Amino acid sequence: MSSDAQRVVPKRKLIEVALPLEKINEASAREKSIRHGHPSTLHLWWSRKPLATARAVLFAQLVDDPSSHPDRFPTEEAVAAERRRLHELIEQLVLWENSNNEDLLRRAHQEILDSTDGNPPPILDPFAGGGSIPLEAQRLGLEAHASDLNPVAVLINKALIEIPPKFAGRKPVFPGAADEQFSTWPRTTGLAEDVRRYGQWMRDEAEKRIGHLYPKARLDDGTEATVIAWIWARTVTCPNPACGISMPLTSKWWLGKKKGKEAYVVPSVVNGKVTFSIGHDPTLAPTKENDGTVNRQGATCIGCGTPVEFKYIRAEGRAGRMGAQLMATVAAGKRTRIYLAPTPEHEAAAEVPRPSDAPPGSIFNNPRNFNTIIYGMTEFSDLFTARQLTALTTFSDLVGEAREHVLADALSAGLPEGDRLENGGDGATAYADAVATYLGLVVSKCTNLSSSITSWMSDRGAFREVFARQAIPMIWDIAESFILGNTGGSWLTTLDKAAQVVEVLPTGRGSAQQASAQSDLATPMLVSTDPPYYDNIGYSDLSDFFYVWLRRSLRPIHPHLLSTMLVPKSEELVANPYRHNGKERAHQFFEDGFRDIFRRAREFALTDFPITVYYAVKQSESTSDGEVSTGWETILEGIVGTGWVVTATWPMRTEGSGRLLARGTNALASSIVLSLRPRPENAPSIDRRGFLAVLKDELPTKLKELQQGAIAPVDLPQAAIGPGMAVFSRYSGVLNDNGTKMTVRAALARINEILDEVQTDQEGDFDSETRFSIAWFRQHGFDTGAFGDADNLARARNASIEHLDRSGILTSRAGKVTLLSPAALADIYEDKVYDPSADELISEWEVVMHLTRALAADGIRGAGALLATVPDHVDRDLCKELAFLLFAIADDRKRSQVAQEFNALGTAWNDIVTEAKNGPGQLSMEM
């Protein structure tokens, strides 16, 4: 026997066959509303992947699909049952509440061990960014490695996966803290407690030094209240010589829009000076037409009504003549906001000199992401008021002072001095460095709500952060927070969120380093990564905003990581047209770099496992091959061209349900996870006809596997690209009739065509009445058609219109035929009981229509109770396939309402089947 014949075929992993995609997406979307303990609250990073997605993908990347073990699962039924068990484990694993469920994580880790001969590979994310992937690898009990060129990202990853294991199980060293709460300090609760205690010390010390800069507000009844925000308007001199006032520039007058508590600024001009009061009468409130002085065209002077172009405002800003005037203060009342007019005392409190030691650093001139430069705000320190700079430099200085206290207390607690954290130490010196690292991250995170780019949200009565989107825009009305308080934007609030993250971090093996992807991929580790996407996000330019503060606070602790003045940029794999002399060259830089990285990864790939790559598709265009994404195509070309086989493509709709996808397109609601394996060096080529034949042979089975998983019908076209591209990419090339290689674009078009054919061919498995109903639905939907047409269509499929009418699938009256929609059935059975249990001639169509009705009315329990009454001879799998097919038809015909209903049924199918095992119950008797 030849060596090729003896070569062991790698086991298929779960990610290459089926995933409970909808449950993963649900958990990922829900994660966006979670704050307490979520790593995103330690420090901001852009486009951080949801933890639920990363956890599920890593698990499925390592665990065998049951079809890989025919000795243990010899039948399709056994394979399906085992796959369901693994899917149920994933569905539990992705829930936020189970993030630290030790029993569940132990079970998940054991599944991984069972599929890796007890020796799972280390996981590497060479574009670690916000750290979701390495963090979840560590949570699953895997050795995690994170690398990134960006020092801000590296520091975040060190805080998430590298520092916690060093100090797990240790008591806090703050004097008295170890005796006040727990007898033992599991995981990193001791470290988190010290972060809180020394952070509190910093706040108390800061109050001694700068507390006088934040006076309280005096209320009408003579009492005082804490001010939580000062609302400022930028100003320039009115260009009208007859006016010349210091005109306020503000996008809105509104302060609070809660009903019954309305508040807004009322400007007045007296003797050439602008003053502000607070109005509360909703009948006199600003309207959309007169809210604020700045709109898209420019500004309007409130003194003389002169329209002022942005050109003038920009020139004044560049000349250093843009100022600011206090419009209002916001004080904390009992569960309410108190809006007050400005006072001379509060204006004077903010008149402090700008600190001479504010962090240096120039903003990169990229008008797409940074709009402040054209107004003369060219340095990062220009993005803060003088009082904000004073507060932030004070806290930054206190990080170093707190570190000295931690070191002294750690030595007093008996810890050996040891080496620095950067050198791998784990004694008192390293511990002091660790606590200071988290405190430095808190200073950095505070800048997101302590900047002159922070504004006030009148609808919510709260601050809008600098990075509400992935850019630094120009803000006209500044909301300055009370950093010494305990509300939004304060040091203590930010500190508490960071400490909550630290105390629940996993403590397995992990490391984070600053390195390029090309150099890091030279180590044999299993890759799971979320690389940059062309120019979607300019990470290095944006992160400079935080870097200058991290460098000021933490350079003595991380001297090598924070050695450069700004974040390194020349090697960053981003298609930045402002850095690469135009869009075309920028795209070429990105694509060349992307191919180099995947060529390098191919050289050192582990053959027993697929790698996983996240990719967000942004741009799409209409062509003769349908709607395509040029970015998506180019990335696939790069992957296939560097020796990879695409084995799966999973759409991750982490932004919520969104719009339904147009069938047959490659557009996405959020992003894709690709599963890739190295293609053998001696892979053969194939001609176009052979390629299509293999597609037609393999896609039906793969499609059935996908449908058996917990995947929504809306995601099927995109997920089906995976097995289609698996065929295309397994060959060194697919040759057209003229000898040229088929492109990815052409391959995607052929895959979509054959997917249509496969789904059409599936119709032959349905009963005759269902086949008629599908054909009629294609032509008419739930609208009325002629009896003659319906009768001819039914006879050709051996069906009877008369029987269909009696069974309640349609109505046939006065020469007209109408299929009954789920909504029409709901009206018919509003006061009637529908019991299919005794109907021996029931069709799959009838079952699906009534299940769709029941799901909409009574949810999964109601649909499950109804399914339990359906006779056993009805094939449940065919009913599920019908739901997928009907979604595809409805979506293709732009029938969005019924498409959503069928999508919901297909998505919930596995849960409905599980519920049906409980029997009909009371619900079915009440239908």
Image: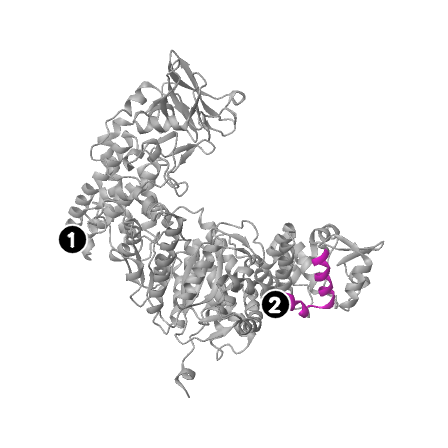
Label 2 is placed on what type of residue?
Val
Tell which residue pokes out farthest to the top in this image. 271
In the rendered image, which quarter contains the N terminus? bottom left
Query: Dot 2: what SS?
Result: helix
Label 1 is placed on what type of residue?
Gly
Q: Is residue 481 visible?
A: no
Disc on res. 758: 2
- Quarter of the view holding residue 889: bottom right
429 relative position to 59: left or right: left
- Residue at 71% x, 62% y: name it: 775
Q: Give the range drawn in magenta.
A: 758-779
Residue nearest the observer in this picture, 174 or 572: 572
Give how far apart the Cα atoms at labels 2 and 1 are: 71 Å
Q: What residue did someone put label 1 on?
A: 414
Disc on res. 79: none
Percent position of residue 626, x then y? 56, 56
Residue nearest the observer in this picture, 830 or 322: 322
Per the picture, the main secondary structure of the magenta-coloured stretch is helix
297 relative position to 378: left or right: right
